[in-house]
Amino acid sequence: MLVPPRLSPRRTHAAVIAGCLVLSSCGGGSGTEVSPPTAQAQPARPVEFSDLQIAQLIYDGTPRTPSDFFQEAQPPGPSHVSTRHLKNTDLDATLTDSTPQYELCADNWNDALSWSETSAQQAGAYADLVATNDDARFYEFGRSRAGDPDFYVRERVFKCSYLNRTAADLRLPEGDAGQLNQRPVTAEELRALAEYLWQFTTYNNFGHAVLKSSGAVSPGSLTHTLIIATLEHGGISATCDRIDVIAWRHADDTTSGALQLDLETLWSFGARESGGNRELCSG
């Protein structure tokens, strides 16, 4: 909701004078009084954190998500595990940066395995297939390199029966986000998807923190929003960083399953860190 701007004292004074000239009765007595403008209600703050608390959280770097946020289970054994979804650009090295990029989905295990092998063959160093897994959402292929026990990557391919991302473009911050084919579409399912997809974005790095994860229901539509704080070093001046608080929002049509991603900056403020001290600043 947009809030109408309040009149400054100078404009308020000018408005009163203009009213006096029209009514010709500003000297007192039976003149008509001009009431000051009514204060407008400000939109509710979507999180309980103060700006200073947000800055402290950003500079600390942990925790970066709420306590009940989705957590990926780590497989036993390797000390370092990376997880990625195979994309169209992993299969065709000739595609340019202007080509829309999206995660692949498959209707069967053989196609998913073939794509994983193609991607592995095109990598700088080949990684052997050492494990396979799947659930209702995706096929998973675990790969490791001979003589490198610390390298373990989980390559995943969405099942088209769960999520088709062909219409999405990961190079864009918002827009078409594909189609959720899970039925029925529920608020909890959309939350699980939004928090899962967050893992594969730039927001899952130092300098970013999820402040809140919440959903909303309306006729024919579900929405799930992550309120995220992001840091830009020197975004205001050489001695003052800028922190943006954004709403990263997925909306789902409960009939068709069509997903839309929207990004909105809610507010920004200045902050700095020096010698372990954190404070707000304006420049």
Image (cartoon, grey):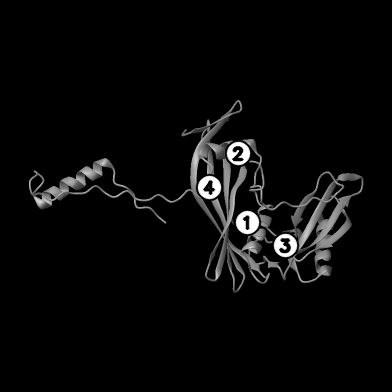
Q: 247 or 67, which is in the foreground?
A: 67
Eyeballing the image, is 224 above or below 28?
below
Q: CA distance from mark 4 to mark 1?
A: 29 Å
* Residue 8 lies in quadrant: top left
Q: Residue furthest top?
A: 275
Across and down, in percent, residue 76 comes to 85, 49
User: What residue did someone put label 2 on?
Assistant: 57
Q: CA distance from mark 4 to mark 3?
A: 37 Å
Residue at 83% across / 64% down in the picture? Answer: 113
User: What residue did someone put label 3 on?
Assistant: 88
Query: What numbered label is drawn on residue 171?
Result: 1
Rendered-image quadrant of the N terminus: bottom left
Residue at 64% across / 69% down in the picture? Answer: 185
Q: CA distance from mark 1 to mark 2?
A: 28 Å
Whichever of callouts 4 and 3 sits on the residue coming sooner in the sequence is 4
The mark lying in front, picked from 4 and 3, is 4
